[in-house]
């Protein structure tokens, strides 16, 4: 679509800056991508060349969010060791050019699945596409941050604890009167958080609509986009975040209404199958009880992201009608978190009762 009035910028000023700093000549035609709900993304059409411009949204933002320089640096450093990153062109920290920092990268040709797959594939080919996407995440988790020079982005041990604390703080700051408190969920996450399972480079926003597929082979990923929240961190937290978006065909109608990716398509792995595939590929042991923490955290984190976006809409910092009903999604995510917590707590109680009965039987038999 063409650029929304509230998201418009001085195209001539951006073009002049690119000509001087990146040797890109001419003034492009500009279109805005509407799929994202965080940073703003635009297509710059030059004769014979398409570029992508990324910049922050207007309105209240988390202090650490929307850092264009950080996002540009991550992709520049990662490109030599992880080929699924677009080629960077230039970063502009000068807000006076278009009103905010921005960066520009090459556009990667291919298709990006949104709500629907966008390709007519058999069940077998859809499953192949799904596992290739998961392999992309697993391959990323094998990248050593130190090998890229990005290890200084992390804060060392305690990643899980910092995430629980940080996202809890963000939710309380973004809460509006029409959503729940999440206090029981936050308390459970605090009480049940595990130690870090490891540290690697994580994407932190891994979804199908951030993956570009080969135009000649719709099952083969060629690029991974949107590195805004990438950081050295716990890989299981990354998986939990990815599965928060994973809506299955057998989910309830309300959850399906907020589906943003084609994970309901016949041939796609279920959430349980995804976890099994991931732990088998990485050779890790992970019980259902242990996974419950990462699943709840992923859903809670998504609720915070949704609520932060809705907060901007609620306070008229954006008029994008797509955000109007995000508060409903927040309520739905809280209910789902609490169902998983009840199930996990029930399992824990059953195991505790079973162990107590075994001990009593053992003593009686002496």
Image (cartoon, grey):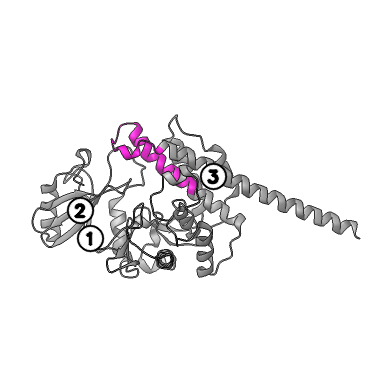
> Is residue 104 shown left or right of residue 261?
left
> Is residue 323 shown left or right of residue 109?
right
- Quarter-of-image position of residue 103: bottom left
**What kind of element bears circle 2?**
strand
Q: Position of residue 355 (x, y in %)?
A: 76, 55
Q: Position of residue 193 (x, y in %)?
A: 57, 51
- Quarter-of-image position of residue 291: bottom right
Q: Residue at the location (31% across, 54% down)?
A: 70
Q: Compared to 209, does 8 lie above or below?
A: above
How many dots with numbers? 3
Residue 3 visible in rendering: yes
**What kind of element bears circle 1?**
loop
Q: How many angstroms separate mark 1 from mark 3 (CA)?
A: 37 Å
Question: What residue range appears in magenta?
Answer: 299-326
Question: Crowdedness of circle 1 by 10 Å Cα count: few (<14), some, many (20+)?
Answer: some
* Dots 1, 3 in contact, CB < 8 A: no
Question: Which label number is shown at residue 337?
Answer: 3
The one of 1 and 30 positioned closer to us in this rendering:
1
Residue 143 visible in rendering: no
Q: How many angstroms separate mark 2 from mark 1 (CA)?
A: 8 Å
First-in-chain label (2 vs 1): 2
Q: How many angstroms separate mark 2 from mark 3 (CA)?
A: 37 Å
Whether the magenta-drawn stretch holds residue 126 is answered as no
Q: Which residue is mark 2?
A: 43
First-in-chain label (1 vs 3): 1
């Amino acid at each position: 679509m063409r650029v929304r009035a509230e998201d418009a910028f001085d195209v001539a000023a951006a073009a002049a800056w690119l000509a001087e700093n990146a040797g890109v000549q001419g003034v492009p035609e500009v279109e805005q991508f509407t799929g994202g709900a965080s940073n703003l993304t635009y297509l710059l059409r030059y004769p014979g060349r398409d570029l992508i411009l990324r910049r922050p949204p207007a309105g209240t933002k988390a202090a650490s969010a929307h850092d264009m320089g950080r996002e540009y640096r991550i992709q520049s450093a990662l490109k030599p060791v992880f080929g699924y990153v677009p080629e960077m062109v230039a970063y502009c920290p000068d807000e006076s050019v278009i009103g905010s920092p921005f960066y520009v990268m090459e556009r990667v040709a291919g298709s990006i699945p949104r709500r629907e797959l966008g390709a007519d594939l058999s069940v077998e080919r859809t499953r192949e596409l799904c596992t290739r996407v998961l392999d992309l995440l697993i391959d990323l988790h094998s990248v050593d941050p130190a090998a890229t020079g990005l290890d200084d982005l992390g804060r060392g041990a305690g990643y899980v604890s910092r995430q629980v604390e940080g996202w809890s703080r963000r939710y309380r700051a973004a809460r509006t009167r029409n959503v729940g408190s999440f206090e029981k969920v936050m308390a459970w996450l605090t009480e049940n958080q595990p130690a870090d399972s490891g540290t690697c480079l994580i994407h932190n926003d891994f979804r199908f609509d951030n993956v570009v597929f080969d135009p000649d082979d719709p099952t083969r990923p060629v690029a991974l986009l949107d590195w805004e929240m990438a950081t050295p961190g716990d890989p299981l937290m990354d998986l939990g975040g990815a599965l928060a978006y994973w809506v299955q065909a057998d989910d309830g109608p309300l959850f399906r209404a907020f589906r943003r990716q084609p994970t309901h398509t016949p041939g796609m792995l279920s959430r349980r199958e995804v976890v099994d595939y991931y732990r088998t590929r990485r050779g890790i042991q992970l019980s259902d009880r242990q996974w419950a923490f990462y699943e709840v955290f992923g859903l809670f984190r998504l609720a915070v992201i949704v609520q932060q976006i809705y907060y901007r809409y609620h306070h008229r910092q954006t008029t994008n009608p797509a955000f109007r009903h995000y508060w409903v999604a927040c309520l739905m995510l809280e209910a789902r978190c609490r169902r998983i917590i009840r199930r996990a707590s029930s399992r824990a109680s059953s195991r505790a009762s079973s162990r107590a009965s075994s001990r009593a039987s053992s003593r009686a038999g002496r």
